[in-house]
Every structure is written in C-alpha cells, then in structure tokens.
Amino acid sequence: MTARTEKKMLAAPTKVKLSTSDRIYYTIVYTLIFFLTVIVIYPLIFVLSSSFSSGQAVTNGRVVLFPVEPSVMSYQKVFEYRVVWTGYRNTLMYTVAGTLWNIAMTVCAAYALSRPTLPGRGWLTFLFAFTTLFSGGLIPSFLLIRDLNMYNTPWALIVPGAISVYNMVITRTFFQNTIPHELNEAAVVDGCSDFRFFFAILLPLSKAVLAVITLYYAVGHWNSYFPAMLYLNSRSLWPLQLFLREILIQNQFSTEMLSTMTDEEILRLQGMSDLLKFAFIVVATVPILFVYPFIQKYFTKGVMIGSLKG
C-alpha cells in the first residue's frame, strides 16, 4: 500500500449505517425543522415581497410569495418622510450609547462576582437575582425618572436599564469557567494589577460572550419603544420604533407624508397605507439584521459556555 493510498483511506469519511428507527427519527426531526423554518421565514418573505409590490396588488391579496407588479414607490415615499431620518438618528444614538453603557456595567459586575475572593459574593448575587422576581412598578419608576430630571431626555432610555441580570449571569459564568483564577494569581505574581488584568487579559479572552451580550443589548435597544412612549413627549427624541408603532397600530400618517404625493398618485395607488406599512417594517428591521453575520461565529460558543456550565 502506497503512502498516497493510505492517505486517501484516512481522509475518506466513515459512513455509519443507520438503523430503521434512526432513519424514522431523523426524518421526523428534519420534517419538523423544515416546517418550523417555513413558518418563521414566510412572514418575512411576505412582508418583503409586499413592500416591493404595487398598492393595488397588496390590497387585492395577490401577493403570496414573490412581488406582484414590482415597484419601489413605497420606499421612495417612506424615505421622503422626515421622521424616518429622525427616528434612525435617535435609535442609532440610543442603541450605541445604551449598549456601551450596558456592556461596561455588565462586565464590571460579572467580573467582580466571578472572583471567589469577593466578600459577600453570595449575598450580592442574591440581590441581583431578586430584582428578576420583583420590581418597583411602573408608577414608582416614572416618578424616579422625573425626580432625577431625566424625563423627556435621552438619558431616560440609556441609564435606567444599565444591567440585564440574565446577561450578567451568562458573563459571570463565562468568566468562572473560561478564565481560571490561577491565571489571575499568576498575573499578580508578575506584578499585574487588577485593572491591567481586566483590560489586557480578561477582555481579549472574552470575545465570545461579549459578542453575545452586545447582540442582546443592541437588539433590545433597537426594538424598544415602551420606555420612549412613557418618558419622551417630544417627537424630536422619538426612536424609530415609536414612529413605526404610530403607523402600524394607530394607522396615522401625518399630512407631511401625504403632501409628498400628488393627487394622481393618491388616486392611482390603492392600498398605499398598507404598502407603506410593509416598507416601514423593512426599513426599521433590516439594519439590525446586518449585525448578525459579524458575530455569528461567536454566538453559539458564547451562549453555550455562559449558560450550560456552572
């Protein structure tokens, strides 16, 4: 046997013969996965196809899977609506600032609680967990925001939700199981301070969990509208999702949007209201979807290590 033949035999995958019960099991599992995937993906495809169809096709229910009478009229009208750009600006600001604030607070708390030498670590962990069961309530929270002079300011959407206990527990467990305490002791022996160990060693080794909680926090800020509805009364500070809620639920299109359309367009395009809703949903959803590909390789690793161990 030549070396080349032996190498090919070693490289060839070994086929495992499945029993009848295994084939039935995998068939059922793959069938369920297929149908669940269709159930999840079809609404997204329908919204996207409807946004590129004509208003009359959407009204008549002729859009099933692919766009009917393709048109980009809805997107032209949505981007001519000035509040879209206002909402984008505000949402981007709240998402970036809020996520940075969340990451800083979460990582600091998780690192402290992951150290076995922290005095009262058990009680502090209990206090964090206690907040997941009980809260002050809506009215006390509103009064607190008002008394702190954060009402109708961007700080009302950034400061209060500093830490998600769930994310903090994931991060703390990741630190405990991935960053051994002996590494910290060795660094201290070499003259490394806790501050330097945190920034120079701990954070570079924690990219997986940092990517996961960054995604969680960013999606939460991007999709959030309820705190803005409570604490902001100025439309110039509204996030994009609050404008989307106004259009979808209250079915309100201001005279500003209608003024961008000619009388002929209003008469010719039936169902423009529904068409604009679909386009607005796509415009508000697509940007956050582009974040996933950049952190996908970290996502599974970070969640599994941070939640299953310990």
Image (tube, rainbow, N blue to C red):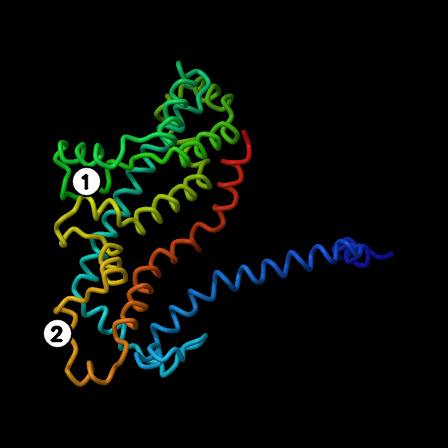
The residue lying furthest to the top in this view is 119
Residue 168: image location, x then y, percent: 40, 33
Going by the numbered disc 1, the residue's amino acid type is Trp
Q: Is residue 197 visible?
A: no
Rendered residue at 26%/75% (across/down)? 272
Rendered residue at 48%/30% (across/down)? 173
Residue 230: image location, x then y, percent: 20, 44
Q: Quadrant of residue 97?
A: top left
Circle 1 SS class: helix
Going by the numbered disc 2, the residue's amino acid type is Ser
* Residue under numbered circle 1: 155
* Residue under numbered circle 2: 259
Mark 1 to mark 2 CA distance (whole Å): 34 Å
Residue closer to the observer: 246 or 102: 246
Residue closer to the observer: 17 or 1: 17
Q: Is residue 120 left or right of residue 232?
A: right
Is residue 133 depicted above or below 3 in this figure?
above
Circle 2 SS class: helix
Q: How many marks?
A: 2
Is residue 60 depicted above or below 207 in this figure?
below
Residue 206: image location, x then y, percent: 45, 36
| The N terminus - image quarter | bottom right
Q: Kindly report which numbered mark, 1 or 2, lies closer to the viewer in this rendering.
A: 2
Is residue 109 depicted above or below 120 in this figure?
below
Number of residues whose C-alpha sits closer than 10 Å to that of mark 2, classed few (under 14), some (14–19) or many (20 or more)? few
Q: Is residue 40 left or right of residue 83?
A: right
Rendered residue at 63%/61% (across/down)? 31
Residue closer to the observer: 85 or 224: 224
